[in-house]
Image (spheres, rainbow, N blue to C red):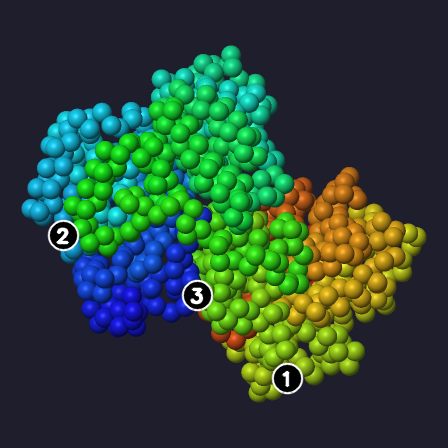
Amino acid sequence: MSDPRALQTALRAATRGDVAFDTASRALLTMDASNYRRVPLGTFAPRDEEDVEAALAVCREYGVPVVARGGGTSVGGQATGVGVVMDFTRHMKEITGIDPEARTAVVQPGVVLDTLRAAARQYGLTFGPDPSTHARCTLGGMIGNNACGSHSVAWGTTADNVRELRVLTYGGERARLGRGLGGLPPRLADGLRGLAEGQLALLRTGFPELPRRISGYALDQLLPEKHVDVARAFTGSEGTLGVLTEATVELVAAPKARALAVLGYGHESAAADAAHLLLPYGPLTVEGMAADLVGDASGLPKGAAWLFVETGGDSPAEAAARAGEIVRAAAPETTGHTVITDPAGQRALWRVRDDAAGTATRMPDGAEAWPGWEDCAVPPARLGAYLREFRALLGRYGLRGAPYGHFGDGCVHVRVDFDLVSAGGVRRFREFSEEVAELVVAHGGSLSGEHGDGQARAELLPRMYGPAMVRAFEHFKDLWDPANGLNPGILARPHRLDENLRFAPLPKGPVDVEFAYPGDGGDFTAAVRRCVGVAKCRETTVHGAGVMCPSYRVTGEEAHSTRGRARLLHEMLAGEVVRDGWRSEEVRDALDLCLSCKGCRSDCPVGVDMATYKAEFLHHHYAGRPRPAGHYSMGWLPVWLRAASALRAAPVLNALAGGPLGALAKRIGGIAPERALPALPGETFRSWWAARERAGGAADTVLWPDTFTDHLAPRVGRAAVAVLHDAGLRVTLPPGAACCGLTWISTGQLATARRRLRRTLDVMAPALDAGLTVTVLEPSCAAALRTDLPELLPDDPRAHRLAASVRTFAQTLAELAPHWAPPRLDRPVVGQTHCHQHAVLGDGAERRLRERAGLTGELSGGCCGLAGNFGFERGHYDVSVACAEEQLLPSVRAAGEGAEVLADGFSCRTQLGELAGREGRHLAEVLADCLSGNSRKQHGK
């Protein structure tokens, strides 16, 4: 394409959709969840079928290919392309009708699977296929790849659940696909009839019989005995034949109750050998996983491999009885078993399975693993034998992988630790792929059992089908798309499997960075490579205590998802699309709405840590030049607050904060005008301590006087001292100024943060030498000391010692005063677990302490939206409020007057006070308030 600007202009003139040819938009869609990368000319988000038709006409005129894209979670490279990528997730995502009598739904291609399932739930129905990406994959993508999921043993593949499709060909022809040729343009109908009639013998004998045969085109569906089912033949065509604009899909009755039987086995092959023997008992799922993937997951019976077998029924008792029947049938071969009827317990174990698409991308030692042989399938009865030979083949090549997947259907997912960076590693990748293809075919299997061939396997289709069938595939493609304008290089006449690898343009040597990136060998490029594109960050609802990714849930923009930001950083390192390196404004703008909540550090299956990447980027981006005003006002907050305390300026500053001078200060400091400046207390925590506390004997713990507790909420520190004393613990404070560096880290002022942290280590040296724990009341400061400190000062052993000594308030009580009985409050609680606590510290000790104190109820997930300096920065207010409105504010508003509002973080308490008018309190305050002989007044209330 010689003039992309002319194409862009023509698309904007002809359509109502969103046309974007800018650097960021192109960079965001260079990759899916595969090993492949292709740079598009531009992107287009159609609003309706007419938009699709008009855009195709423009692309035909300019000779530009089109790739239809849903959630972008394809692992074969099908959702990448060099022409125009057509994104259906922005506008064409409506459920246009559900017919509970007919058990059908009519959907646009951008509908997310879980959205459909939620809409169908009110009728007792669901859509049967459910890949692990169900919370973000789209129906269009599922139809494109013929997705399956864990329940395919009961409800089949997507093709088994498609009734009718409306599509547009690249040539502009409209077609309605179902059974028979009546809905096709005459040219296409005649061509398909001729193809089927001329190849009857080949189509009847050339396809292996197995439940998960996804590879190639499903030409056998054109046979008369298959009712000439064009819709099923089209399903799984990976966007190469036509562009889907609407689908009528079948729904199935959802079981009223479910139970989960977890069966343990001595090794993986034993589980694989047993899986198909359970099918006669009518399970909904038979999933397999081995110990090298489940990690430290709890609730599993004894074994080195497990089958997850789900059963359904009209009642919990019926579901449990069916699970018991399966347990008894399997018992002779199992090492242990458990039956879980509690829905929460089932969800916890299914999360382990759902996250496997991400967790499998890292070996136990942290080495990278990649798709390529992600989902081949063999007849279920041969799965055990296949896995034994597959493991042996891995060993011969010196490779490792952790197979898991749909054992009941003979389908195995596995990511292998290929070296896809060096030339030798890529050669070995090709050689191994060719050998595995032969192994799969020898067992009567399919190269793809769920995700389609894409670029990863299509080159090897002749090994599975032979040259005659491959020629038939090419004929089929040419009938639909004679101009080869839809997803060229995929399925028919494919690219080589070792072309277009996403790693090729990345730096070959180390990038000079500030953080240590211990999980990635100090390599920032490897850290960015962590994002493989499974897109859990694109989920639109929070599950449980989850956090990731609040800014995406507010904006719905790919650039504001963890994956989108990782993609832009990848392209920044590649230097082909994003060419300004660390000075890139596109990367800066995408990171601007990152709250640094750290949610991705724990919620992302592969542990992408965007808060650290953001701090790294800001450090380089602003090196040697002026920074935003907020970096000076809020990044240096500890300095300004200490100065105000030293000058005893709190009364004056508080008086001025609400007037014209306060407004001027906010304007100069880059602070959102909607925000109120926090009031300064008359006495800091340290001053209170110095005036009132006298250490008696050796201390048990050091109470960390973080900036927020010391200068903005000293009542929290006073309450903590009261509780710790009541628990029999002797408390001391650091002998000098100690700071975690958080405000400098979050604004990317890493050189200053490092200097502050070194001073802190000097101050804390005596406590470290004494082996004292360090109790940190502010979760964000505790998280900074636990993770950022050793990653900024990796060569200082004191940094690791201090990080290891950090405890939350509840952790200190649990470890140092395990027999202390907290006061019984016996009241409900509401509020939010701090996002940094969720991501870095864990909240198990807090949960147990609340339970012992009689504080009942769950705290909400998500992020409060203030997130330190983020919500105070000019331009962030609306996003900050929207984040709070997702879970925190509704839960607090719905709580009764007697509910205790818990918020251990200063940001969370501030957000609650400003937006809900409710006082949030630290758990220490709540407990101190009820200690015998104490009152709110005694603790600074």
Q: Earlier in the sequence, mark 1 or mark 3?
A: 3
Instruction: Point out the frontmost of discs 2 and 3.
Output: 3
Say which residue appears at 40% left-offset and 29% top-offset: 438
Q: Is residue 641 above or below residue 94?
A: below
Residue type, mark 3 in image: Val
469 relative to 836 in the view: left or right? left
Residue extending farthest to the top is 332
Residue type, mark 2 in image: Arg
Q: Residues within 10 Å of mark 2 (few under 14, many from 20)?
A: some
State the image coordinates of residue 514 (x, y, percent, origin top left): 66, 63
- Tell me which corner region of the image, top left, top right, bottom left or bottom right, holds residue 430: top left
490 relative to 75 in the view: left or right? left
Q: How many marks?
A: 3
State the image coordinates of residue 308 (x, y, percent, origin top left): 47, 28
How far separated are the C-alphas under marks 1 and 2?
68 Å
770 relative to 60 in the view: left or right? right
Q: Which residue is mark 2?
A: 174
Residue 577 - label: 3
286 relative to 179 in the view: left or right? right
Say which residue appears at 44% left-offset and 51% top-offset: 501
Screen quadrant of the N terminus: bottom left
Residue type, mark 1 in image: Leu
Q: Which residue is mark 1?
A: 656
Q: Residues within 10 Å of mark 3 (few under 14, many from 20)?
A: some
Instruction: Point out the frontmost of discs 1 and 2.
Output: 2
Say which residue appears at 44% left-offset and 58% top-offset: 553
